[in-house]
Amino acid sequence: MSGPRVLAVRLDSDGDVLMTGPAIAALRHGADGGAASCVDVLAAPPGAAAARLLPGVDEVLVADVPWSGYRPPAPDAAALTALVETLRERAYDEVVVFTSYHQSPLPVALLARLAGVPRVIAASDDYPGSLLDLRHRRPGEPDGTGGEHEVVASLGLVAASGRAVPADPRLALRHPLPELPADLLDELGDDLGAGRVVVVHPGASVTARAPSPEVAAASVAALAAAGWRVVVTGGPGEVELAARVAAGVPGVVDASGRTSFAQLATLLEAAAVVVVGNTGPAHLAAAVGTPVASWFSAVMPVERWVPFGVPVVLLGDLAAPCRLTRAQVCPVPGHPCLDVAPRTVVDAVEALAAGRVPVPPPAAPLSVAAAGPAGTEQAL
């Protein structure tokens, strides 16, 4: 007799999906001690490429829904009806809805119930009525402070379902990863295997979580002057930003728009350090085990969203006036929380590359260094 068919749902961006990876992998363990016959993932378009990189996922379904994402579509009855029919046709035995602390799983739970799914589980602070068979409560405050890292919180939902979860979780990707484009390999030459490449990713899915182009450009120039081979990356919509950040600095490679998401993982895996904001490539770097110097905006709780399982140095003023606003556009003129001095970025990269920054234990308070504006140090 085959095991249950499980659908894991994470309707978010690529970083969110990557952080849910250990929990999705744990769904292979049946709640009754058996094993699932398949584990599929339902992802939003911004997270689908990440979902396809997760180990142990059989198939990735994609849906653009009106209750999630930074630019959600208008409600579409036909599209939602089609999604219900897809779930019905696939005859899942269980739907596990993963969300962040500020999101509701109940829209997905309702669709799963309409599709006849017999078991639906999620973490929910809202009254779920008859929509959930297991209503899990996440620790922490309503504003998202305290509690557990997003990776650990997702595993908490899986554990609550009666499954075994790893004691020491780490992000992971399917291997082998694809090769980099030939022209990019030629441009980087021997530097790629010599431990001298630093990737700088200046963009973010929302502008409040990225440094200003001027701050990023100054950091790129300082890293290049310090002897690092700097590669600036960005998605198809960040080509103009990357070109601006890389402009005029000898030896800097502009790789924006030249890689797929999986090829970006290949590049990050080969880098000594990745310098990036609180956005998907930070978690992609963590998934391939590369240390991260993170321009971390105060708008989100750091204890929940810091890159997981790798050495990290946080760059930014975590006590800035924008703290915990979850703003998509910085509400403070000048974006001061990420006005980090170039020398501070260089020092962070050198400390990470030299192995002087430890990996924080998964369930322990963070102990990484954080640099505020103009390089002032602050403790977490």
Image: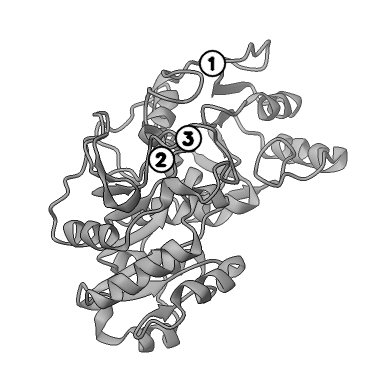
Q: In which image quadrant can residue 340 be found? A: bottom left
Q: Secondary structure at mark 2?
A: helix
Pointer 2 residue = 25
The residue carrying pointer 2 sits among few (fewer than 14), some (14 to 19) or many (20 or more) residues within 10 Å by Cα, namely: many
Q: Quadrant of the C terminus?
A: top left
Q: Amino acid at mark 3?
A: Pro
Disc 1 or 3, which lies upstream in sequence?
Answer: 1
Q: Amino acid at mark 1?
A: Leu
Q: Is residue 263 left or right of residue 85?
A: left
Which of discs 2 and 3 lies nearer the camera? The answer is: 3
Seen from the viewer's position, the closer of residues 42 and 329 is: 329
**Could you tell me which residue is drawn at 41 percent across and 77 percent down?**
180
Q: Position of residue 173 (x, y in %)?
A: 38, 54
Pointer 3 residue = 321
Q: Secondary structure at mark 1?
A: strand
Q: Amino acid at mark 2?
A: Ala
Q: Is residue 317 above or below residue 94?
A: below
**Could you tell me which residue is drawn at 68 percent across and 10 percent down?**
129
Disc 1 or 2, which lies upstream in sequence?
Answer: 2
Residue 177 seen from this side: no
Q: Which mark is residue 134?
A: 1
Q: Position of residue 48 (x, y in %)?
A: 58, 53
Q: How is the image coloured?
A: one colour
Q: Secondary structure at mark 3?
A: loop
Q: CA distance from mark 2 to mark 3?
A: 38 Å
Seen from the viewer's position, the closer of residues 156 and 117 is: 156
Q: Is residue 69 above or below residue 334?
A: above
